[in-house]
Image: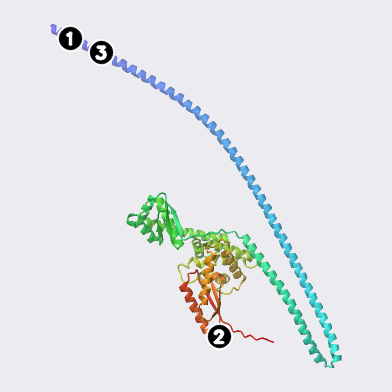
Amino acid sequence: MTLGFIYNKEVKNIEYCALIAAITALVSLIAGYGLRKYIAESKITSAEKAAAALLEEARREAEAKKRELLLEAKEEAHRIRNEVERESRERRNELQRLERRLMQKEESLDRKLESLERKEASLQRQEETVRKLREELEELCRQQKIELERISGLTAEEAKALLLKSVEEEVKQEAVMIIKQAEMEAREEAEKRAREIVIHAIQQCAVDCVTESTVSVVSLPNDDMKGRIIGREGRNIRALETLTGVDLIIDDTPEAVVISCFDPIRREVARIALEKLILDGRIHPARIEEMVERARRELDQKIREEGERAAFEAGVPDLHPELIRLLGKLKYRTSYGQNVLKHSLEVAFLAGAMAAELGAKVHVAKRAGLLHDIGKAVDLEAEGSHVVLGVELARKYRESPEVIHAIEAHHGDVEPRTVEAFLVQAADAISAARPGARQETLEAYLKRLEKLEEIADSFPGVEKSYAIQAGREVRILVKPDKIDDAAAVHLAREIVKRIEKEMVYPGQIKVVVIRETRAVAYAK
């Protein structure tokens, strides 16, 4: 019984403790919930304050940005206004300059008209003088006829024949003197006019002088790239050289690779492909082949664009697409270091300007000037001189006979028959002879001419030889008593063979053997 009482008491204590623990837990939960609610409300309040502060700061920044934008807009407006005013001033100055040039040209035309009027008056005076001389001669003839009839007692027909013979000799002498004087004045005027036309055409033409060499230099980001270009056992550089046909020179030059090739097209393809490979970073034979093909396509597109631009600048429309492509190829072709496309544009401008001054066909002169060296676009691929190849291309793509003739005659291979052909020939000579246009030194030029004359003079029977047309032609005078007509033909062929064997020269050299017989007698 005592044990049961103790047990019941213990159970009641345990229940009491459990009740206290439950109450404590409930109070804790209520307190925790209230604490979390208080913390959450505090955070919400602080977040609202922070949001309000951010909004206020954003508003202030927006106001500041707005003021900055307004200030920048005012400054931009001020700058634009200044630029417009500056352009207006420049245009006014340009208009004033053009007005001065027009006034100068008008004054020049007035002077020329006055000169023509003076010459016309001079010719009228000469005609009046001739008329008076004719009247005097008629009077003299009449008096001479009367006197002869009185003195000689000749018949009228005999006296008339004698008188006519005497008068005819006198009139011939006077006419010869007048004609000679008129020819001298006309020749002087023609030379003066020709100089004025050439000077005016040169002053109007402003084409850059572009010279190129047979190598291109590609910059590298670092010297480690040289090893990647060479590749394992040289496979990369061999693949690039095989696909493009160039020589890659990798030497001690820091951060640079030299591309060497006499064909400018292949050299340009190699340069573009190598630059793309360097930018890409993946250099191996398959990638090299892909980049070379892409470079060829890009270069073809660039060539066509250059041809279209050249035709547009020269004012030559309606060119055949293939001729436009060949014109673009001339950008990568040089002659004595002179860029052939720039040279062709310059010849077109000069020929057109001179044709305008002379009243010739400007469009024919420009077209022939632009296409006169078109054969140089294919002379590395086909046999024959660039003149022959250019004529074949012009005929193939149906250019007019006047343009074809001017192309054929621009180096004197045939005699020029039209004014435009003469103008293209003159413009070509002016462009090539312009200081700085070509890189050939005077010493090398003189040595080439001396070598040509030396070869010609070394043959027996040659009296004298002359290298003319910048070394493109050799004229050889032979002794007629030692060289007959058949031997002259044989001599020309032998001299050609000797020149081809011993000399290096661009284009072709024309050999002309001249044999003439002179009969000389002296009256004592």
Total marks placed? 3
Residue 470 in the image: x percent, y percent? 55, 69
| Residue drawn at the location 84% of the way across and 92% of the way down | 152
* Residue bearing the label numbered 1: 8
> Is any part of residue 265 visible from this angle?
yes
**Secondary structure under badge 2?**
loop
Residue 40 in the image: x percent, y percent? 39, 22
Mark 3 or mark 1, earlier in chain: 1
**Secondary structure under badge 1?**
helix
Q: Are marks 2 and 1 in contact (CB under 8 Å)?
A: no
**Secondary structure under badge 3?**
helix
| Residue drawn at the location 59% of the way across and 62% of the way down | 349
Write down the quadrant of residue 287 in the picture. Answer: bottom left
Q: Is residue 246 left or right of residue 92?
A: left
Residue 397 in the image: x percent, y percent? 51, 69
* Residue bearing the label numbered 2: 481
The nearer-to-camera label among 2 and 1 is 2
* Residue bearing the label numbered 3: 19
- The amino acid marked with disc number 1 is Asn
Few, some or many C-alpha atoms within 10 Å of disc 2 (few <14, some 14-19, many ≥20)?
few
- The N terminus: image quadrant: top left
| Residue drawn at the location 47% of the way across and 76% of the way down | 497
Q: Is residue 425 left or right of residue 455?
A: right
Mark 2 or mark 1, earlier in chain: 1
Q: In this view of the protein, which residue sits in the foreground, 430 or 300?
A: 430
Q: How far, Cα to Cα, is label 2 from label 3?
A: 156 Å
From this view, report whether residue 305 is shown above or below residue 474.
above
Residue 140 in the image: x percent, y percent? 83, 83
